[in-house]
Amino acid sequence: MGSEDVGSNRTSNTIGRRLHGAEALKAHATLGVGLAFCVVAFWFEFKRATSGNALSWAYVFEWPLLAAFAIYMWWHVLHPGREKAPRKKEGAVAPEFEGMLAAWQEHQLDAHRVDESRDVRRYP
């Protein structure tokens, strides 16, 4: 049992674990500071924009978007593992295109065989 096994085991146990206690408090505090900064920056840029600085209008819209992204990321940090379920594959290819898919796959196999016969080296 190597050190890789121990590290990977510890990591796999923490994936999907919801934050509690001090960890959650730190996440909340970070969000609060970030949102306060976004509000102050928004107000500062709004005042500059209304006083005639045209470039500040871009920042007026940027800071609320940044705040919304911060809230989105905060939610995902607090609730890990709540990604959408993968969609079921009902059929990868429409029935009328199955012949084309088979021909393409056969072409790919032939090309691979030619590459192997020529001893073509592929770089990762």
Image: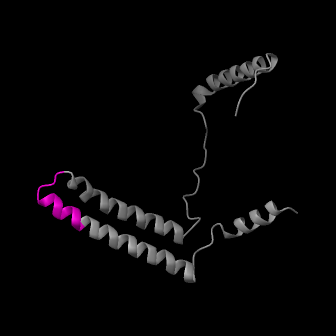
In the displayed structure image, the side of residue 48 where residue 3 appears, left or right: right
Which of the 4 image quadrants contains residue 84? bottom right
x, y percent for residue 98: 63, 27
Magenta region, residue range: 43-54
x, y percent for residue 4: 79, 60
Q: Is 48 in front, or is 69?
A: 48
- Structure colour scheme: one colour
- Is 6 covered by the magenta stretch? no
> Which residue corresponds to the image point at 76% horizontal and 17% vertical from the top-left?
114
Question: Please, is residue 23 above or below residue 66 in the view?
Answer: below
* Residue that extends furthest to the right in the rendered view of this protein: 1
> Which residue corresponds to the image point at 63% horizontal and 72% vertical from the top-left?
17
In the displayed structure image, the side of residue 57 where residue 16 appears, left or right: right
Per the picture, the main secondary structure of the magenta-coloured stretch is helix
> Which residue corresponds to the image point at 24% horizontal and 59% vertical from the top-left?
60
x, y percent for residue 53: 15, 54
* Residue that extends furthest to the left in the rendered view of this protein: 51
Which of the 4 image quadrants contains residue 36? bottom left
